[in-house]
Image: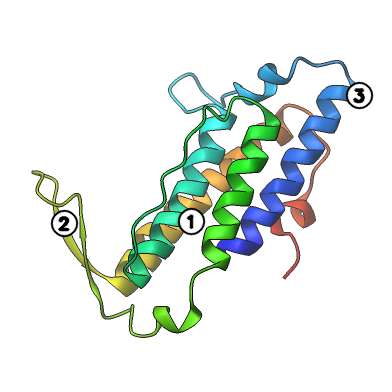
Amino acid sequence: MFQQMLTALSGVLAKAEAHATERKIDPPALLQARLFPDMFPLARQVQIACDFAGSVSARLVGVAVPAYEGGDATFAELQQRIAATLAFIGGLDAAAFEGSEERELVLRPGTPKERRIGGRAYLLAYGLPQFFFHVTTAYDLLRHNGVEVGKKDYMGAY
């Protein structure tokens, strides 16, 4: 699911970049667009979607959560972030996910917000909803700003 949706998000961003070029829109106008002042801008929505895809996958298989460097301030940098996340996920051994639904995960260890949660609940009640929220918000920001994308673009190939 992470791979499908990140690949689709990459396509949506490509259409957004083309939209900006064709209409002579300064790319930061789209990259910093927000639905409401207290919400993150497009670039941050994409970053967070990638972070959830990578961190949820890593925690479920018991490997270190990937860290990404770079400001992700351009469409090209966001595309690189998506590609790096897809490469990380694609490099995980599918067999390592076996039994992860029963694995206990510790979120924010050693802090007052430490929480222990089973792998299934972590994926279904936390990880996927967070991921979809940010992918959907990124899509909505672009659609709201006139980028010609539709449901097929959002869903990608399945």
> Could you tell me which residue is drawn at 79 percent across and 31 percent down?
17
Which of 87/16 is in front? Answer: 87
> Could you tell me which residue is drawn at 19 percent across and 49 percent down?
108
State whether residue 32 appears in this view: yes
Q: Identify the secondary structure beneath mark 3.
A: helix
Q: Position of residue 48 (x, y in %)?
A: 47, 42
Mark identifier at residue 115: 2
Please give left or right for residue 154 compared with residue 117 in the image: right
Q: Nearer the viewer, mark 2 or mark 1?
A: 1
Q: Identify the secondary structure beneath mark 1.
A: helix
Q: Earlier in the sequence, mark 2 or mark 1?
A: 1
State whether residue 139 appears in this view: no
Mark identifier at residue 53: 1
Give the residue furthest to the right: 22
Quarter of the N terminus within the rendering: bottom right
Q: Position of residue 88 (x, y in %)?
A: 52, 59
- Mark 3 lies on residue: 22
Q: Earlier in the sequence, mark 3 or mark 2?
A: 3
Q: Identify the secondary structure beneath mark 2.
A: strand
> Could you tell me which residue is drawn at 57 percent across and 27 percent down?
35
